[in-house]
């Protein structure tokens, strides 16, 4: 492995990154033609198929989770105007933001309260459907509310769902798996918040705690699943179903923008700011949006200064072969959902020319943005979600009629005392 000095010689920005400085990097191959990685075939039709599967499961979701009844079992978040927040950013940073800002409020997603509700829940539902159909319990045109019945739960109780997580993915998988009747084991890294572990246990999931980081938790979970043929591993580092579930968000956002009368074209570009950990959620969303809007949408990834794993991987072209520890970083951040030292095995390679830019953000700034979002728009975000909020300031967007979507990835399930403590830190 190259030394920090050697890496910094080739990519000077690494020097700043290694010192936990906030950086901005515009991707020089963005929009250019590159060779796509082998073995990954996914189209808009695949995303539409995933959306149809989620709609098939809506009767089950509605029956299993009372909070989804008002939306008839569809788990989706609102797109909210953020005029007051935008005005605050402009005053605070003495910079005009060209265009209009909106918050995609995944913090308000029902069932698990984060962006992971799409990918994690989708992959478990897909697996449950495959098992049930193969067993002859149901057909694709059947009544999916029956997934909440005792015969289905008894059948699923012979199977175990396993994953490794820093928190939110584990929550989504644990909650939906238990509701279906699966046994579930979530391997949690050392940076996972205690309240997330407690909530999983309350729902009936087994939580295995690791003193090491996220990659170790994933690796252990993967090895356990390999040894048991009735176990299914949700692999956040390398899962196409997970990725596809996240991509469904693009179809939902398209509908919301259409309903709001917002045009996306050459004169009206769409900039989407996405907090990034291992890359599955922002990668899937970005891929889906590119299928829908092509060159008129520009994904921008946000990472903590202590864990810029995707930026490091894409900038150097080394992807998952490099860890942030290789440049002297400790992966220690309040943004637990983004505390990932090594990126996905395939997402950086797949989206190498489709991510417009990257920036990093310090923990203190996360707290401040979290507090400001609540004071201006009443948004309750967790620190990792606040990484997207400063995106329009980081970018120099020239188009006067641009649309900026700040993806708020989680927050509504944070216990009140924990959230209040984070809020107070942002007010200091």
Image (cartoon, helix red, strand yellow):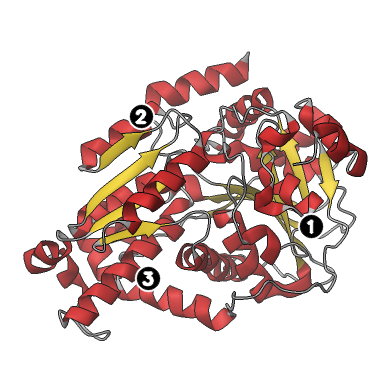
For image coordinates 54% across by 17% down, the residue present is 424
Cα distance in 3D space between marks 1 and 2: 35 Å
Q: Is residue 428 above or below residue 124?
A: above
Q: Nearer the viewer, residue 428 or 344?
A: 344
Earlier along the polypeptide chain: callout 3 or callout 1?
A: 3
Q: Quadrant of the N terminus?
A: top right
The reply to whether discs 1 and 2 touch (Cβ–Cβ < 8 Å) is no
Cα distance in 3D space between marks 3 and 1: 30 Å
Residue 54, which numbered label? 3
Q: Quadrant of residue 165?
A: top left
Q: Nearer the viewer, residue 5 or 193?
A: 5
Q: Nearer the viewer, residue 245 or 293?
A: 245
Q: Nearer the viewer, mark 3 or mark 1?
A: 1
Q: Secondary structure at mark 1?
A: loop
The reply to whether discs 3 and 1 touch (Cβ–Cβ < 8 Å) is no
- How busy is the neighbourhood of tag 3: few (under 14 within 10 Å), some, or many (20 plus)? many
Q: What percent of the width, then of the height, locates residue 261?
A: 65, 68
Residue 31, which numbered label? none
**Residue 260 relative to residue 128: left or right:** right
Q: Secondary structure at mark 2?
A: helix
Q: Which residue position is annotated with label 2?
A: 195
Q: Nearer the viewer, residue 416 or 33?
A: 33
Q: What percent of the width, then of the height, locates residue 346?
A: 62, 61
Q: Which residue position is annotated with label 1?
A: 356
Q: Quadrant of residue 143?
A: bottom left
Q: Quadrant of residue 286?
A: bottom right
């Amino acid at each position: 492995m190259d030394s920090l000095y050697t890496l910094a010689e080739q990519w000077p920005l690494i020097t700043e990154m290694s010192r936990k400085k906030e950086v901005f990097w515009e991707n020089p191959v963005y929009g250019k033609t590159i060779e796509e990685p082998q073995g990954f075939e996914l189209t808009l039709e695949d995303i539409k198929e995933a959306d149809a599967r989620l709609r098939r499961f809506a009767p089950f979701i509605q029956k299993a989770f009372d909070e989804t009844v008002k939306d008839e079992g569809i788990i989706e978040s609102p797109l909210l105007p953020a005029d007051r927040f935008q005005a605050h950013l402009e005053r605070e940073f003495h910079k005009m933001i060209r265009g209009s800002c909106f918050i995609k409020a995944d913090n308000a997603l029902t069932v698990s309260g984060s962006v992971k509700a799409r990918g994690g829940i989708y992959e478990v539902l897909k697996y449950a459907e495959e098992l049930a159909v193969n067993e002859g319990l149901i057909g694709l045109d059947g009544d999916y509310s029956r997934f909440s019945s005792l015969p289905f739960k008894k059948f699923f109780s012979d199977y175990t769902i396993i994953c490794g997580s820093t928190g939110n993915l584990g929550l989504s998988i644990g909650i939906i798996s238990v509701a279906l009747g699966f046994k579930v084991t979530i391997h949690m890294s050392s940076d996972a918040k205690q309240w997330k572990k407690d909530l999983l246990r309350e729902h009936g999931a087994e939580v295995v705690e690791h003193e090491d980081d996220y990659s170790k938790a994933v690796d252990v979970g993967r090895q356990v699943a390999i040894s048991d043929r009735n176990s299914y591993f949700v692999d956040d580092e390398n899962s196409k179903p997970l990725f596809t579930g996240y991509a469904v968000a693009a179809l939902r956002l398209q509908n919301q923008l259409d309903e709001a009368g917002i045009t996306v074209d050459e004169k009206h570009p769409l900039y989407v700011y996405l907090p990034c950990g291992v890359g599955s959620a922002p990668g899937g969303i970005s891929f889906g949006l590119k299928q829908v809007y092509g060159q008129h949408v520009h994904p921008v990834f946000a990472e903590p200064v202590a864990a810029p794993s995707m930026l490091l991987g894409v900038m150097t072209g080394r992807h998952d072969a490099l860890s942030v520890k290789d440049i002297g970083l400790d992966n220690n951040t309040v943004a637990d959902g983004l505390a990932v030292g090594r990126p996905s095995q395939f997402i950086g390679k797949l989206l190498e020319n489709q991510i417009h830019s990257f920036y990093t953000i310090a923990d203190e700034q996360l707290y401040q943005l979290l507090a400001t979002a609540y004071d201006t728009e009443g948004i309750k975000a967790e620190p990792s979600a606040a990484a997207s909020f400063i995106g329009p300031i980081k970018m120099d967007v020239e188009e006067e009629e641009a649309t900026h979507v700040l993806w708020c990835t989680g927050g509504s399930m944070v216990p009140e005392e924990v959230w209040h403590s984070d809020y107070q830190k942002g007010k200091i």
